[in-house]
Image (cartoon, grey):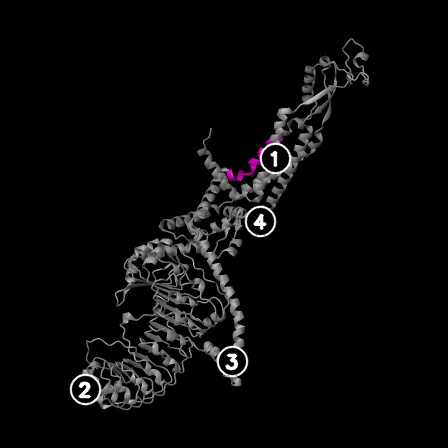
Amino acid sequence: MFSLSELAPLNQHQNQCKLLKPWWEVFMDYLGVLMLLASVLACTEQLSRDKLLCIPLDPHTGQSSSPSDNMEQITSQPSTTANPTISSPPQGRRTHLVYQQYVYISQVCYHDALPFCSRFFPYMALMQSLVLVASGSFWLHFPHTSARIEHFLTILSKCCESPWTSQALSHAAQQDTVQETNMTNQRTLSQASSYFLSMNFIRHVSMDSGSDSPLLKRAESISTTTPPSPCPSSQSCTFEKTSDLVSAQTHPFKATVVENHDPQHDVRLDKNDGEQARALFEKVRKFRSHSENSTVIYKVYLAQTVFKLLLVVLIGGYTIPLLSSFSFSLNCEAEEQALVGYSSFQCIHVLSSLLRKLLLAYISLLGVYGLLNLYTLSWILHSALRQFSFPSVKDVISLREFPDLRNDLAFLLHMLDQYDPLLVQRLSVFLSPLSERPLGEEDCLEHRWGEERLRALVTVDTEGSSKLTLVALPRIPSALYTLSHLHVLRLELITDVRFTAQLSNMSSLRELHLYHCSAAIAPGALNVLQDRLEVLHLTFAHPSQLPGWVHCLRGLQQLHLNGRLHNEGGVARSWALGSLRQFRHLRVLVIRSMLQRIPGELCEVASTLVRLEIHNEGTRLLAQSGLKRLVGLTELLLQDCQLERLPSALTALINLHSLDLQHNRLRTLEELSGLLQLHHLSNLRLAYNQIVALPPCISVLQKLKLLDLANNQLHSVPLALFTLRGLQKLLLSGNLLQQLPGEVRALQSLTELDVSGNRLESLPSELFSGCLKLRILNASHNYLRTLPRGVGALTEVHKLDLRSNSLEELPCELVHCSGLYGGGLLVEDWLFLSLPPLVRDLLSQSQSSSRPESDTFPYFSPTQWCFHSALESQI
């Protein structure tokens, strides 16, 4: 007997062989089973109750009695009503045969008179069915084909189970999704182009008619100006901004805790899986070279189909005429008169009706079986089964480089494609050179980006924080997780960022930058980021690219968002980040987007938020009432918001220390009087606006230490400005000033003065006698003709810029300004040569003291220059 363990491999092999059976093969298998059951049923009935019942036809001639006695007809007498208990006499004729004689003559007539088909049809049908069933899978078990087919099925099962297969198909599906999204965006942009053409037409018409509509001016400014921004993505082109303004194709942001994926789709290949994938590629390559050199499987299958078709024709040819041979009654002429006294008998066949019906059913099934074989033969002859070029697979997935297969391998793929096209797709992954290329790149990535190279790329800033930037890699190298002392990690343009649980090895990681990276994270890595990450920078192009795990970073202190954050058009459109109540420790929020209102969700972090920066990329911030709830703010920056007046909500920010409203459209500052309640305001930056005049109410800001009014349209400076006794930095560059009042001497705490880019013809002498703490003076790009005599009193000055003026000579008093030694004086070379040689030598000698920090003269060492992205620094 066979054990179950011995039968299990046979069953498994049979199940695998089903993958190569198309629908007609499966149908024929079921038909063969039905024919086999019909023949078994006929055989069972034949063996159990098949017999003849016979009675004699002629009278008995061997008895002494008269024939009248033997053939006497016993007529039945009707019963009378008087005696109802008397039974009627028997009818018929008497044969005077005993039971043994009936049995004997029935057996004789069964062998002599019963037709051959009635006796042996069930056995013939059983043998025919067995032959048909055996021939149905002969090509799978033929010695010259079974080994090759079994090898093919083994490779196929490994291809289906390999993580590399799922990863390649998932990547191809993502590429198809991106292509569909691009096509949708192109259709949206084509619809938006008509809108911009109409806007341009309206603007030109209004300019021709002399209209001065603010709405048209705003539309013109948006379409013609590009506000400065350090981000290359936001500085890319005006077309990107305008397309974002009119695009209605947005996707709501879904805040999920962790991005859970199917393990087979998102599993990252480790070393063992990578080796198995490479070994599988090699097996497929060898099997292809071996199977494409022969056509034995194709020929055996063709011969099997022809054999089955001929067998069906043969069986049908001699079986159909047998239908007329089945009869219920028949006459038997037996030469046994000496034993029974009769020679002619009338017999009936008990199973004739059942056998006839089973034969009809058998012929019907055989006919359908023959039609399927005929269809199979036509499919073989009319289809190029020895060529396979993946026509359907190229339309389904994005892998395009597939080789054309031949002979037996092509035939097996045709059979597999008829069973399930998905299996062909999974096998095609290991037949495409394009699919094998990423595996080599992945192996090359781990080889090239090892731990030593990553440590060599780590830089340390002035604060002692180690920083690493990775740009345009296919994925994160596994050696990254060995950098336990890394503080800042910048990932830029990496298509597949997946943080695993090994992130726990980076115990010092506190800051993370994701520049156009779609990041997924494992639950173990999410727990690490929740406890350690303090600063997060996200740069994206669409709200749907925001990772859902951001809301789980409960320990986050700084969040920097760079990209479009709105979902719907209009003023009341919601921003895509959703609720912020999970950020219980958030202190700094920086937004580079195109908002039209202050998000109401900011009030959820009002108790902890101390710094808010909004770089609005030239979009007008219409609603600023949301600022009133942020009473804990100490620093507020609203740049490129197209503000024309100071927001009234500023009066509620009583804790504000620094206010930055640069790059707006402020023309008047009459609302400065409302800032009287801001007792802590010390820094006010209003550069790059359209301010024409500074109101006298500037004097209410007595706590100011820095006032930046650069690049405006100021013609004069009010005397009220010089009542700000605590002012330390005054920046007035890029205006239209023609003179600087002598009252500037009242600013005795002034350490930096910038009046470059104006129309000054002279500097007041009071500046040098009153502002003795001045360390930085920038008077370049003016019309200065001479310097006052008291310039030597500025003994603490370290930077003096006098370039691009009308000076003809420099005073020798500069020798008393010891802070200018070592390059602190910036003038033209010819003007510097006008000084006496001794003065020149003193001003040119090296100075060991450190340079002062300044907004006008920033000093950075070559290793400290920082760009928004490493890609921009390379450019």
Disc 2 secondary structure class: helix
Q: CA distance from mark 4 to mark 2?
A: 99 Å
Q: Position of residue 361 (x, y in %)?
A: 65, 35
Residue 639 in the image, given as x and y percentages of width and height: 39, 75
Counting residues from the start of the chain, the first of labels 2 and 3 encountered is 3
Mark 4 vs mark 2: which is more N-terminal? Answer: 4
Under mark 2, the amino acid is Pro
Q: Position of residue 55 (x, y in %)?
A: 73, 19
Q: Nearer the viewer, residue 730 or 431?
A: 730
**Residue with the mark numbered 4:** 383
Q: N-terminal of the two: label 1 or label 4?
A: 1
Is any atom of residue 779 visible in this view?
no
Amino acid type at image mark 3: Arg
Is residue 386 placed above or below 219 in the rendered structure?
above
Vertical position of residue 364 compared to residue 75: above or below = below
Mainly helix, strand or loop, the magenta region?
helix
* 232 sits left or right of 377 in the view: left
Q: CA distance from mark 1 to mark 4?
A: 30 Å
| Residue 127 colored in magenta in the image | yes
- Say the numbered circle drawn on residue 35: 1
Q: Front-most of 468 and 91?
A: 91
Cα distance between the residues tagged 3 and 1? 85 Å
Which residue carries the number 3 mark? 203
